[in-house]
Image (cartoon, rainbow, N blue to C red):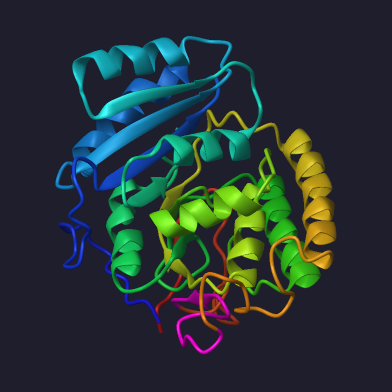
Amino acid sequence: MTTSHTSPGPPVAGIPSKDPHTLSIVLPVYDEEAVLGRSIERLLDTLREWKSELLVVDDGSRDGSADVARRWAERDARVRLVQLKRNQGKGAAVRAGLKAARGEWMLITDADLSTDPACANDLLNALGHGADLVFGSRRAQGAQLLQRQPRLREGLGRGFTALTNSLLGLGLGDLTCGFKALNRPTAEALLSCTHVDGWAFDVEWAVCARAQGLRLEEVPVRWAHQRDSKVRVGHAVLTSLLDLAQIWRRRRTGHYGALAPGTGPLRDRSDPSAGEPRMNGPAGPPQGFPLPRESGRVTIPTS
């Protein structure tokens, strides 16, 4: 089980040393001009101890997001702009970022930085201790929700996670947090077998990882809802359900690998690190722990 540290820290022992870039930060954006400059600055400052590059993937924005990223790229060599000609969806933008990434490790985060970037150290620690793919989780033990989502949006997210776990047997606590980390071999495997362009791309990641025998872990994060989020909830729910049906069909036909977990080509069946997802605590607060009001703050207890 992954041991998580709640305070930011320097890169862990065992960090890849391949130059010129060790960590690729993939930042998919769509119409984020208003917050993008602040987000780039905060990411570069928070992760300044890492040898890193920041890939801003503009998903066909209609505003000046690409111009903001371009100006940053001109003043800071760590920043690169990857531009899609038209809006294709978050999954497509993330794939474009992974294809362009030079680092041995990769971090995915949302443009509004709803997850505290300092939590990256915890996810990267998990990679350093043998995980192949790490999902940030708002429901693992030790997670902090500094600002809750509106009740409808939070309920839809929980419902989607429950439906997905029931349909696909993933056993994950949080599928909709946008904070994730992975290593290069995992990125290459996901690029070869995943196709979802929309919001449910991370579900396909989890299905592919399980089929391929990759070690998937969940790590608690500090998270706060951002009121200026660009997510259109109704559209996101509908497209995610359609994508979920496609993922279910592909899985049934063996597209991602054998139906039994841990039997794909990337790991030997006897590898003890392959198999079920691991989480630093149960999915959700212990029974009897009251959730706060909609606008409240909560820390999921660690004991």
240 sits to left or right of 66: right
Across and down, in percent, residue 46 comes to: 22, 42
Q: Is residue 216 magenta?
A: no
Which quadrant of the figure has residue 174? Answer: bottom right
232 sits to left or right of 291: right
Q: How many marks?
A: 0
Across and down, in percent, residue 259 comes to: 74, 75
Tell me, yes or no, if residue 74 can be seen here: yes
Q: Nearer the viewer, residue 214 or 294?
A: 214
Taking the spot 78% from the left edge, 47% from the top edge, the residue there is 243
Q: Nearer the viewer, residue 138 or 179?
A: 179
Which quadrant of the figure has residue 275? Answer: bottom right
Which quadrant of the figure has residue 173? Answer: bottom right
Taking the spot 64% from the left edge, 22% from the top edge, the residue there is 87
The quadrant of the rendering that contains the N terminus is bottom left
Residue 149 versus residue 86 in the image, above or below: below
Residue 142 versus residue 73 in the image, above or below: below
81 sits to left or right of 246: left
Taking the spot 48% from the left edge, 52% from the top edge, the residue there is 187
Tell me, yes or no, if residue 296 can be seen here: no
Taking the spot 19% from the left edge, 64% from the top edge, the residue there is 12
Residue 295 versus residue 168 in the image, above or below: above
The range drawn in magenta is 269-280
The quadrant of the rendering that contains the C terminus is bottom left
Q: Nearer the viewer, residue 167 or 42?
A: 167
Across and down, in percent, residue 109 comes to: 44, 43
* Helix, strand or loop for the magenta stretch, by majority: loop
Residue 198 versus residue 130 in the image, above or below: above
